[in-house]
Amino acid sequence: MEFVKDKKLNFIINISIGLVILFYVLSKLKWLFIYFSIALMLAYFFDPLYKYLINKKVPKVLTVIIIIGIIIAMLVLTIFFLIPSVINQLNILYKEIPNFIDKFQNLILSLEPQLSKFINPEDVETLLKENLSELQKDILNFSRTIIIYLSNIISSITFGIVIVPLILFYMLRDMNIFKENLYIFVSKDKKKEFKEILEEIDRIVSGFIRGRIIVCFIVGALIGIGLYLLNLKFALIIGITSGIFNFIPYLGPIVGLVLALIFALGSSWWVLLIIVILFVIVNQIEAILLNPNILGRELGLHPLTVILFILICGQLLGVLGILVAVPLAAILKVLALRYLVQEE
């Protein structure tokens, strides 16, 4: 029994040291791993199409070129159509921020009779004067930063158009070779076990990434189209934001709803009600239809686990941490189940 405990302790110590080294290396080579992580996500996403074309006897190199062509076309459309539209809406939003602050102030003041039962009316007015002007400055600075960042990121995306497809080309073409080369570092008696671990990690990561990207796109599109039909300003921004944040399970509709209600301040109550109903419907579509049919019921990663790892890794490594969080969670889950839980 003592031996089992020592073995588990050694496993925990080795994993901890490995994580420290991993995060140190990732922090030093951040942009390299960002491009590599994006290429890996794309490889997982397009893997079904890759296998389909290969099964149809399409040459491997031509298959990879077709997939890269699709990706480049999507990037070009994003750079020349989507990003300029987003920047344009952000510029309009930047100019309208004072109006939103005024609407919010008027809303608070309209509630003053009710608030006066709990707070001194003079305190309410003082609070508004002191904090709303500061809030307006913070929002304006934040919006300006986002606009500048999106304007500057075009050059990074353009550079990524060259680097990511290059990495993706070799990743798709030689993925099996890379996996086989990993076995060189494993002794013969451990190869079977190592292969099982690798296949389980691959199943979890590929299922989550492919399914999550599809779910995020559908959720973002449903929210964006729904708000556009409601004639709400900045529907594109809210739809994109909801889709991106939905990579963290169920967070997208919550963030989108808050933004939509803020942008709809001053509208009639029935407009606000319809917005809430729209987001409830989208959330139910995701929970009842999208997640079970696209992600699957037995994916292997609980939403809370994903949220926790994304928050921790994101805090430590920023964008790169968000990209590596799911693969890291899958690796640790498989290793922990095999070397800790199953040996009890």
Image: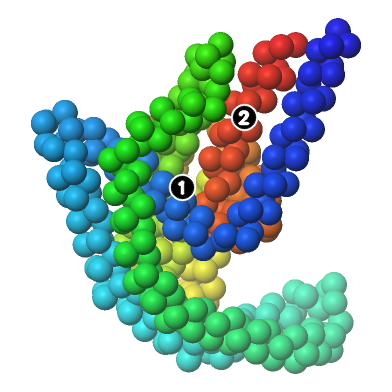
Per the image, the residue denoted by label 2 is 333
Residue 155 shows up from this direction: yes
- Name the residue that disc number 1 marks: 283
Q: Is residue 83 left or right of residue 280?
A: left
Query: Please, is residue 333 above or below residue 275 in the view?
Result: above
Q: Disc 1 residue type?
A: Asn
Give 315 or 106, whichever is nearer the viewer.
315
Q: Could you tell me which residue is drawn at 75 percent across and 11 percent down?
A: 344
Q: Disc 1 and disc 2: Cα gap in Å?
A: 28 Å
Residue 290 appears in the picture as rendered: no
Residue placed at 82% from the left, 25% from the top? Answer: 9
Q: Can you tell which quarter of the image residue 129 is in?
A: bottom right
Residue 59: image location, x then y, percent: 13, 38
Q: Alpha-carbon neighbours of circle 2 within 10 Å: few (<14), some, or many (≥20)?
A: some
The residue at 48%/20% (across/down) is 195
SS at mark 2? helix
**Position above or below: 193 against 238:** above
Sequence-first tag of 1 and 2: 1
Count residues near mark 1 (Cα–Cα under 10 Å), then give few for <14, some for 14-19, many for 20+. many
